[in-house]
């Protein structure tokens, strides 16, 4: 079975330092067939002028150089992770059309409170406020699933990473809350990501979104699954890939979804 990682970041992302060559060397050491470089592009922040945005021209130069250097040894897919991709459909289309992407990830990092959940201090919120943030987050996630031009919806339990375990009850995992999200993904043929970063961060013992929610997605008719480590360091490339495979099998999946030029390719689980 092909081994891959479709969610990685290097120094082009504001929150990562790794070079693409370091990723390539890690991929070889870990026996990966391919990985996608999916640097952050926070659409709302860039379009509102709050952030400059990543240097995609420099990324392209490095991508071509590493593709030539590692040809025949590891495949590097051209990808992007668009944060808040529903913010401006015209701007999103212009961004995506500017390059020939293999895979486009869609993420929700910034909630209605205007901040990335990463920067949120839970102590500044009451339990009721946290509950409201979570409900608003799920509504926005469903909107992205319905409207955004993406191939994969990533780390759907993202806010859970940044709330202490003793307050996690504020985030309801009632399956009915995920139904609008999953139905939209299924209708539009968008893959759900198994994101392994939650294991490294110590908030889950299995990849996000866990077995119960993944089984629910499958029961609704979910077919497409991607795996991403969300690596910001080369050492984390393909971290817990085998855990993601076992989770997929446990939930009743027989295939994983791989990509070329935004076209889905089904890879049999073994």
Image (cartoon, helix red, strand yellow):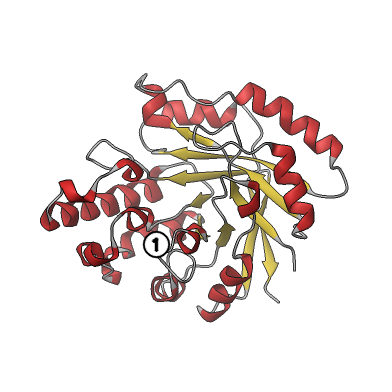
Q: Residue furthest right?
A: 72
The residue labelled by disc 1 is 182
Check disc 1: other Cα within 10 Å, few if <14, some if 14-19, many if 20+: many
Number of marks: 1
The C terminus lies in which quarter of the figure?
Answer: bottom right
Horizontal and vertical percent position of residue 226 = 57, 59
Instruction: Kindly identify the residue that appears in the image at 73 percent across and 33 percent down.
Output: 63
**Quadrant of residue 48 within the rendered picture:** top left
Tell me where residue 71 appears, x and y as whole percent: 86, 43
Counting from the top left corner in percent of width and height, residue 234 is at: 65, 47
Question: What residue sits 29% from the left and 54% below the top?
Answer: 138
Relative vertical location of residue 156 with respect to residue 245 in this rendering, above or below: above
Tag 1, which secondary structure? helix
Give left or right: position of 200 versus 123.
Answer: right
Q: Which residue shows up at 74% across the image and 52% down it?
A: 27
| Looking at the image, residue 88 lies above or below residue 242 | above
Viewport quadrant of the N terminus: bottom right
- Measured as percent of width and height from the top left, residue 67 is found at 80, 37
Specify whether 66 is left or right of 194: right
Q: Quadrant of residue 185?
A: bottom left
* Residue occupying the point 30% across, 71% down: 175
Q: Foreground residue, 80 or 150?
A: 80
Please name whichever residue, 79 or 260, is drawn nearer the observer in this view of the structure: 79
């Amino acid at each position: 079975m092909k081994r891959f990682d479709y969610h990685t970041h290097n120094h082009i992302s504001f929150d990562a330092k790794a070079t693409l060559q370091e990723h390539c060397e890690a991929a070889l050491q870990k026996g990966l067939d391919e990985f996608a470089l999916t640097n952050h592009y926070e659409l709302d922040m860039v379009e509102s002028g709050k952030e400059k945005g990543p240097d995609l021209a420099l990324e392209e130069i490095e991508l071509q150089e590493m593709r030539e250097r590692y040809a025949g040894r590891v495949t590097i897919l051209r990808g992007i992770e668009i944060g808040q991709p529903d913010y401006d459909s015209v701007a999103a289309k212009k961004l995506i059309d500017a390059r020939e992407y293999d895979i486009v990830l869609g993420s929700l990092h910034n909630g209605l409170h205007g901040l990335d959940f990463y920067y949120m201090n839970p102590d500044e919120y009451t339990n009721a406020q946290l509950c409201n943030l979570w409900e608003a987050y799920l509504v926005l996630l469903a909107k992205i699933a319905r409207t955004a031009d993406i191939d994969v919806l990533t780390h759907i339990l993202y806010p859970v990473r940044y709330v202490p375990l003793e307050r996690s009850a504020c985030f309801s995992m009632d399956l009915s809350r995920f139904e609008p999200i999953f139905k939209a993904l299924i209708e539009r043929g968008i893959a759900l990501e198994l994101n392994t970063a939650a294991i490294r961060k110590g908030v889950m013992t299995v990849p996000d979104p866990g077995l119960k929610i993944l089984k629910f997605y499958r029961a609704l008719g979910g077919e497409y699954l991607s795996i991403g480590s969300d690596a910001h360091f080369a050492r984390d490339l393909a971290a817990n890939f085998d855990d993601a495979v076992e989770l997929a099998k446990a939930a009743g999946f027989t295939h994983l979804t791989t990509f070329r030029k935004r076209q889905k390719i089904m890879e049999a689980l073994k």
